[in-house]
Amino acid sequence: MGLFALLYSTAELERVKPAHKMWLQSIGLKLARSNQSQVVLTRVSFGLSGNFSCEVTADAPSFATSIVSNTMDVVVLPASSPMIHTSQHYYMPGDILRGNCSSGPSRPPAELTFFINDIPVTPGLHNSQTASDGLFFSELFVQVHLWPAHYERGAPILRCEAKVADLYRENSAVALYSANSDPKIERVDHAAGNAIRLIEGSLRLCYGLRGHLQRQFPLGHSESLFSLVMRLIGL
């Protein structure tokens, strides 16, 4: 990129011709905050993506010159976590899980990955759609046969990870409860799986307690005792 003004020192920037200074300001170069070692741009557009070079020249008599280049990409990150949609509310071992994960708008499109119980799922169809202002929506579809092994530790957790370079990484997850599970968590957004495992463990403990009370007391009394315990522990 031919940003010739990057070669100027702070003092020299003050002597830039008015026409050149107007051009530099039009691309968002903040003269007051730029110097011989850094450049500050305030109105960055996608057109500024590309190679940037820094050239250092020694004084006379050698005038030795060294140039270092690097690539800059202008990106827009998704404003929220990815969203998961599944074709059913409840799943049993043997069912076919069909779902999709969507993220965006962003630039470049977010890279999406599905996991079940933190194990990567073979990727399905990936689709990117153009949004406004040169951004993109990203969508990934999944189709998986659910086996009893998926339920060994309770309801399987379907998680979608969205990533844009090294700047953005967000996760969303759903718990795939069966129809006779009580209760059902519709959706959980999180940055790690610890929250889901904590909630799931708490639910197993609570409803294991309800089953014990039902075996020891008549139905009406057991439900009353269970409700009382739930209020006492704040659930």
Image (tube, rainbow, N blue to C red):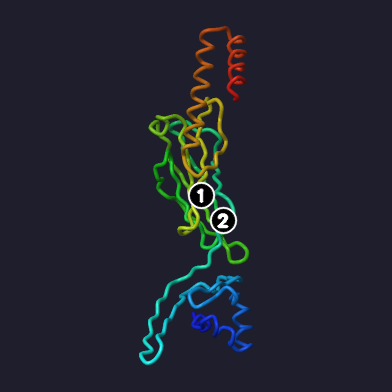
x, y percent for residue 94: 43, 33
Q: Is residue 115 above or below residue 207?
A: below
User: Closer to the camera, 97 or 183?
Assistant: 183
x, y percent for residue 225: 59, 13
Q: Is residue 152 left or right of residue 49?
A: left
* Amino acid type for the residue under numbered disc 1: Glu
Q: Which residue is mark 2?
A: 78
Marks 1 and 2 close (CB-CB < 8 Å): yes
- Helix, strand or loop status at disc 2: loop
Residue count near mark 2 (Cα–Cα under 10 Å), binned few <14, some 14–19, many ≥20: many
Residue count near mark 1 (Cα–Cα under 10 Å), binned few <14, some 14–19, many ≥20: some
x, y percent for residue 72: 48, 70
Q: Which numbered marker is on residue 170? A: 1
Q: Residue at x 49, y 19 (%)?
A: 208
On the rendered image, what quadrant is the C terminus found in? top right
How many marks the image carries: the answer is 2
Question: Real-space Cα distance between discs 1 and 2?
Answer: 9 Å
- Helix, strand or loop status at disc 1: strand
x, y percent for residue 143: 46, 44
